[in-house]
Amino acid sequence: MIKPVLHTIILLFIVVSLKAQENLVPNPSFDEYTECPDYEGQLNYATGWFKANLATSDYMNLCATYIYNTIPQNAVGYQYPKIGNGYAHSINFGSGSEYMECRLSESLKANKLYLISVYVSLTETSQYWVEKLGIRFTKDTLYRNDLQRWTEADAYFEGIKNDTANWQCLTTCYLAKGGEQFLTIGMFDEWDNYIYYPVQPAYPNLVHPEDIHAGYYWDDISVVESDLCKLEFTIPNVVTANSDGINDFFKLQLPSGATFTILNRWGNIVYKNSDSELLWPQSGEKLTEGVYFYVLEYQINNKKEKQTGFIQLIR
């Protein structure tokens, strides 16, 4: 059986400007609470936030008197809030991960770009640090009654540094499908697929030998509809449709309402698709070798966009 290699669409987001927008994240700096935390695993005490699985995502606040939750010194490290009076804490370990979830103040709008920003700080009891952390947007809560890790993220925060002293600002962008109401934050993908680096814990006396993890404080989280992100589709420029099972076609996911058109060198349309998913060349399609021209038209943030380029078809 032929098993073609798929060229899946890649979204590249670039920050281009700054503009104030409404933050859809409730209690973004974890200042507000229903109860002052006094033990581990009490993220639910932070107004608007809850644990997304059975793991013990934590809540630290200046109001706390129990050492696990106090600020700046607590059971996992030493850090002052980025802003306000509180912050959250989660760890990522080999067999699972802790997740934090909130319900946004309003649903995301289809074909709108959203900028997501967070501040993180590696805890002093961590044995590892990772280069990326992820987010998921869903219409319903992701809560699950176990400790297992979700393996798919909608976007990643990348370029994280090994730094326990400072807060790092991380940003990423997301193209909404429409109707997403919940934001989940944590470590997605399998532990073995992550790039992680060992680090010497600053507080080794607080670390159990079997407790191998990367822990992070979280603060000042925001999700805003924004023109900060430029959307660019990476489309392959060569397809070798020779039925060898390698690079025989490419497959793309498109925004709702997008149109993808391919023309030959004489300007004749040989393919046109307005579905959310396209595949080219299609099975049995008789096209000659040569260079084809494509036009991708779509609308983002109520603005019409066009991307063009060339694809070489080799038989």
Image (cartoon, rainbow, N blue to C red):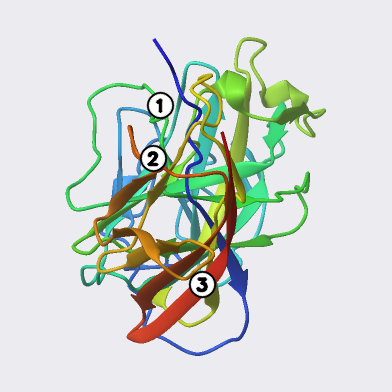
- Is the residue under label 3 in contact with that under label 2 (CB below 8 Å)? no
Compared with 1, 151 (above or below) is below
Amino acid type, callout 1: Arg
- 285 relative to 95 in the view: left or right: left
Amino acid type, callout 3: Gln
- Residue depicted at 55% across the width and 24% down the height: 246
- Residue depicted at 45% across the width and 60% down the height: 63
- 260 relative to 70 in the view: left or right: left
Residue 117 or 256: which is nearer the viewer?
256
Q: Name the mark on residue 286.
A: 2
Q: CA distance from mark 3 to mark 1?
A: 37 Å
Q: Secondary structure at mark 2?
A: loop
Query: How many labels were placed on the picture?
Result: 3
Image quadrant of residue 76?
top right
Residue 77 or 13: which is nearer the viewer?
13
Of pointers 1 and 2, the one earlier in the residue sequence = 1
Compared with 265, 142 (above or below) is above
Q: Name the mark on residue 149.
A: 1
- Residue depicted at 33% across the width and 33% down the height: 284
